[in-house]
Image (spheres, rainbow, N blue to C red):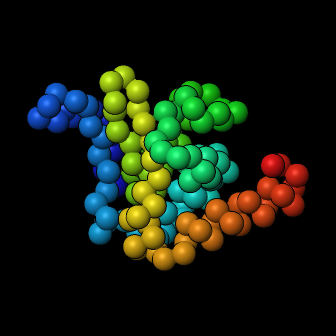
Amino acid sequence: MPTDTTSPRTSSGARSLEHPAREDIRLADVLHALADPMRLRIVCTLAAAEGELNCADIELPVSKSTCTHHFRVLREHGVIQQLYRGTAKLNGLRRADLDELFPGLIDGVLRGADLQARRLGEE
């Protein structure tokens, strides 16, 4: 998996982050990324959003550095796309890529997360 030790710049001067190509995304990596409750919460929030969300728009009960770690794991495993718009880092679910590679996986995970939240009274 690529690591993000620096933020390379595009030809326009904007910062960019490394993402795996669609063909490099592996099921085991996606499942690993989704297995953590905080990362699953991020994915559920992004799936419910109308568009991209800023990292700060997704409230998590963990430190900022831990949030950064969770977003990085999701990006490096091909679950989310992150891009800079100005100083904001925006996040979006790579739904089209995941649906193409693993049909029904994200829908099933989201449905399961919703059922679990209802069962546990976490709605």
Q: Is residue 12 above or below residue 95?
A: above
Q: Report whether residue 43 is seen.
A: no
Left or right of 32 on screen, residue 17: left
* Rendering coords of residue 65 (x, y %): 53, 29
Left or right of 96 on screen, residue 105: right
Residue at 48%, 77% (x, y): give it. Answer: 103
Q: Is residue 18 above or below residue 119?
A: above
Q: Between residues 42 and 95, which one lies in front from this camera angle?
A: 95
* Rendering coords of residue 110 (x, y %): 64, 62
- Residue at the limit of the structure toward the front, as seen here: 50
Q: Report whether residue 96 is seen.
A: yes
Residue at 39%, 48% (x, y): give it. Answer: 81
* Rendering coords of residue 70 (x, y %): 53, 43
| Quadrant of residue 34 within the rendered picture | bottom right
Left or right of 36 on screen, residue 102: left
- Residue at the limit of the structure toward the top, as seen here: 87
